[in-house]
């Protein structure tokens, strides 16, 4: 199985801050890396697919980059609605696996 | 716009079989895409259970493969999940979702609201 490791596990930030979350795969996954946002009690929402493609309807302050084993999710200017938990997911090989999550909290 | 809705018992006894149905509206399953099940134990992260291609090919998480069956009923536009010999470790919110990839997996773009299943006697 491909292990996905996110860092940090939790993060405190303020509205307007630039935030970067990283995700590392245990082996190369090319660009088959997706990012999700999860808010309490709600289903995850796809933000970024294939490492850097912005899902339709997602604000442009979200961006993704990387390939191979190292990836980042950047939020350019945090908004109040962005405080949530973020997950990376590899879809390169079976089993599909998720990172453990990064909880983004208000400072 | 595609919508997914999970349904099934909220309480299952240990050693029994968990059975869930996902009803899809706004899109015909038989047309395309991969359709999957994902679960999330209370307070924990996401675990992929398995996916099925619209033509019937199935892909399972090896950690659950011996206990899982995913199928589609195109006449009802539904997919189903069966998980046998459940234990307390199978207590989780279960989601059905559509993967937006046409020939490869490219992210789950549509999700049901999730259904909580508790395994307890």
Image: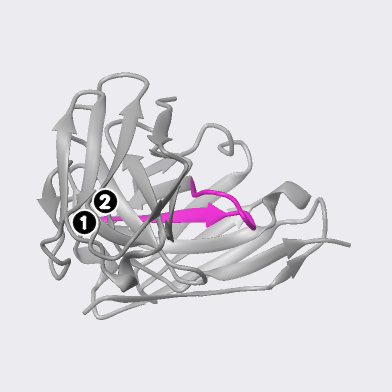
A80 relative position to B41: left or right:
left
Q: Position of residue B45 (x, y in %)?
A: 53, 48
Report the residue marked by disc 1.
B100
Which quadrant of the view contains residue A4? top left
The range drawn in magenta is B33-47
Can residue B11 be seen here? yes
Give the labeled residue for mark 2: B107
Q: Quadrant of the C terminus of chain A?
A: bottom left
Q: Quadrant of residue A5?
A: top left
- The crowding category of the residue bearing disc 2, from other C-alpha atoms within 10 Å (few below 14, some 14 to 19, many at least 20), is many
Residue B85 appears in the figure? no
Task: Identify the residue at image location x=71%, y=56%.
Answer: B17
Instruction: Give the letter of the chain under mark 1.
Output: B
* Element class at badge 2: loop
Q: Are marks 2 and 1 in contact (CB under 8 Å)?
A: yes
Tag of residue B82: none
Tell me the chain of label 2.
B
- Residue in the image at 26% along x and 51% along y: B107
Q: Classify mark 1: helix, strand or loop.
A: loop
Q: Is residue A37 above or below residue A50?
A: below
């Amino acid at each position: 199985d491909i292990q996905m490791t996110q860092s940090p596990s939790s993060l405190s930030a303020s509205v307007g801050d630039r935030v970067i979350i990283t995700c590392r795969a245990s082996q190369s996954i090319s660009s088959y890396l997706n990012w999700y946002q999860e808010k309490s009690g709600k289903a995850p929402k796809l933000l970024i697919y294939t490492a850097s493609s912005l899902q339709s309807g997602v604000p442009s302050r979200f961006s993704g980059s990387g390939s191979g084993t190292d990836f980042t999710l950047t939020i350019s200017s945090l908004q109040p609605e962005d405080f949530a938990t973020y997950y990376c997911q590899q879809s390169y090989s079976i089993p599909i696996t998720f990172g453990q999550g990064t909880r983004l909290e208000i400072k | 716009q595609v919508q997914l809705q999970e349904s099934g018992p909220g309480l299952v006894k240990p050693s029994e079989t968990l059975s869930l149905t996902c009803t899809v509206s706004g899109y015909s399953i038989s047309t395309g895409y991969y359709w999957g099940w994902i679960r999330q134990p209370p307070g924990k992260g996401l675990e992929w259970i398995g996916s099925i291609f619209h033509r019937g090919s199935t892909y399972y998480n090896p950690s659950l493969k011996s206990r899982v069956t995913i199928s589609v009923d195109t006449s009802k536009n539904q997919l189903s999940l069966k998980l046998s010999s459940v234990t307390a470790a199978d207590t989780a919110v279960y989601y059905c979702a559509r993967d937006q990839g046409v020939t490869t997996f490219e992210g789950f773009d549509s999700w049901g609201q999730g259904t909580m299943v508790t395994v307890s006697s």
